[in-house]
Amino acid sequence: MAALGAQSIASSYEQLLHVDRDGGGNSTTHVAIKDGDNGTTFGFTIATDALMMSSTNRLEFGDTGTYIHQSADGVLDLVSDTEIEINATTIDMNGALDLSGNAQLSGTVTVGADGSGTDVIFYSGTAGDNFTWDASEEKLTITGTNGQTALDVADGNLVVADNIDLEGDIDVNGVSNLDVVDIDGAVQIDNTVTVGADDQGYDVIFYGDTASSNMTWDTSADELVLNDSRLVIDQDDDDMSISIDSAATSADIINISAGAVTTGIVIDVPDANALTTGSIINLYSGSSDNSTRNLIKIHNDHSSADNTVGLFIQQDGADASIELGGNGSIKFPGTQGASSDANSLDDYEEGTWTPTIFNATSGGTQVGSATAVGRYVKIGQQVHLQGYFVANALNVSGGNFLYLRGLPFNSHSTSNLYSAGVVGHGSGLAITAGHHMAMVINHNGASDIQLNIWDATTGISQMTGDELSADGGFIFQITYSTD
């Protein structure tokens, strides 16, 4: 270092600065800077490779409000009364960053690098609550206070491109527009559930544990379908279980297709054991319309099903199996469906017939009549006839035998199955006192009644025209069998 010459460089020692060491900081060891008389030591030291602000002394810029200093051992403070601006292409911070104030970031924030991320934690004002990106688990976790809102999207949409797995409850106060929802846990819905809109519906399917078993609302068919399933109603209250209010006029209200049933029961009420004054089935119509209609219709629509019973009633009690009230009756078909079952009543018919008298079983001459009325009742194969006949012109020879014709049904075709009738009143007859009329159907398949007279102790003889006379009359009845 050059020696001082005769030139004056300061008027006093206080105006000089010198290093507190021979050599003047000519090494890597820091030395203090003092004034000329060593009365003042300045706030920095120097070495050949550094300038150090000692203790908490500051390096100021522009004014006392902007400076750099060490506020504590190992702590470097950059202080500005307005703003600190760092301009660089890349700012690399290798240690932890602690921001005590607000941070305004006007560009993209990237944490880590692609394939090498780090955790990010946002702490709340409550201990234990935070918002964490866990880089190793690759998931975002919000830890909040139970019962408090942890994530609040105040405006805009929340879009998730993949699945959402909710392990707790979900509370939706607004409208949820979901394309596909897969829920593995229980769902508690406390308000109305609407699928689609009026005139714009969508299918709804509830699956069972068995393949192909489900309950489906088919919106295109407007039908609720139970596929390979059962409908079970467990009604524990004193109320109806099924109520149908239909406005249909020509369509079926309940339609059951049971084409595969062989030994089962299509509709079964297996237990009504608590019944007292009620009914198992009550069918009621209060319509005043007088059109022909059936309140109950049973149709066995195959003529080969001879052993099919249309209505079976097993009455184990002593009361009636069928009881008719009001103006009820039992009506049989106009054409008998004959049954070979001895215990079956297959026909009932009431009607009128006109008795006629001829002198032959077929053809012949007819006796004129002033009165010829008759009625019949047919119950199964039994025919009960009654009639009243009064002649007004004999028209036949006196010795001709007489036959009452015009029966509504021919007699039974069984040989020797005869039937006899009785005459309860007569007038104008020409028969011997003490004799009386009789009648008989005495051949199978007959359509006539042979008129007789009890005229001997040994039996009868056939009645002739002379015994009837031109104005004879009689009242009679007869019961016979038909096929």
Image (cartoon, rainbow, N blue to C red):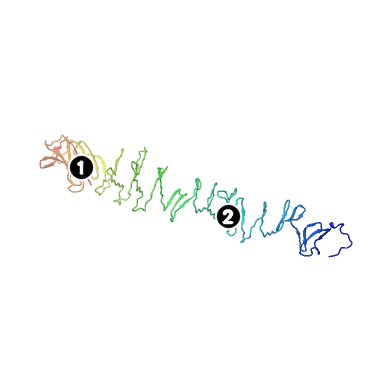
Q: How many residues crowd around disc 2 within 10 Å: few (fewer than 14), some, or many (20 or more)? A: few
Question: Where does the image place residue 361, in percent across and percent down from the top left?
Answer: 18, 43
Q: Between tags 1 and 2, which lies in front?
A: 2
Question: Where does the image place residue 437, in percent across and percent down from the top left?
Answer: 15, 39
Q: Which residue is mark 1?
A: 479
Is residue 85 in view? no
Image vertical order of residue 96 relative to residue 360, above or below: below
Which is more toward the observer, 79 or 23?
A: 23
Question: Where does the image place residue 39, in percent across and percent down from the top left?
Answer: 81, 57
Which is more toward the observer, 183 or 370?
A: 183
Classify residue 78 as left or right of residue 207.
Answer: right
Which is more toward the observer, 186 or 422?
A: 186
Q: Identify the mark nearer the N-term, 1 or 2.
A: 2
Picture residue at 26% right of the left edge, 40% below the top = 350
Picture residue at 60% right of the left edge, 56% below the top = 133
- Can you say which quadrant of the picture contains the N terminus? bottom right
Tell me the element at label 2: strand
Q: Which kind of residue does numbered mark 1 sit on?
A: Thr
Is residue 21 in view? yes
Q: Which kind of residue does numbered mark 2 sit on?
A: Thr
Q: CA distance from mark 1 to mark 2?
A: 101 Å
**As drawn, which residue projects farthest toward the right?**
6
Q: How many residues crowd around disc 1 within 10 Å: few (fewer than 14), some, or many (20 or more)? A: some
Marker count (numbered)? 2
Image vertical order of residue 171 relative to residue 12, above or below: above
Which is more toward the observer, 25 or 407?
A: 25
Question: Where does the image place residue 435, in percent across and percent down from the top left?
Answer: 12, 38
Q: Which residue is mark 2?
A: 141
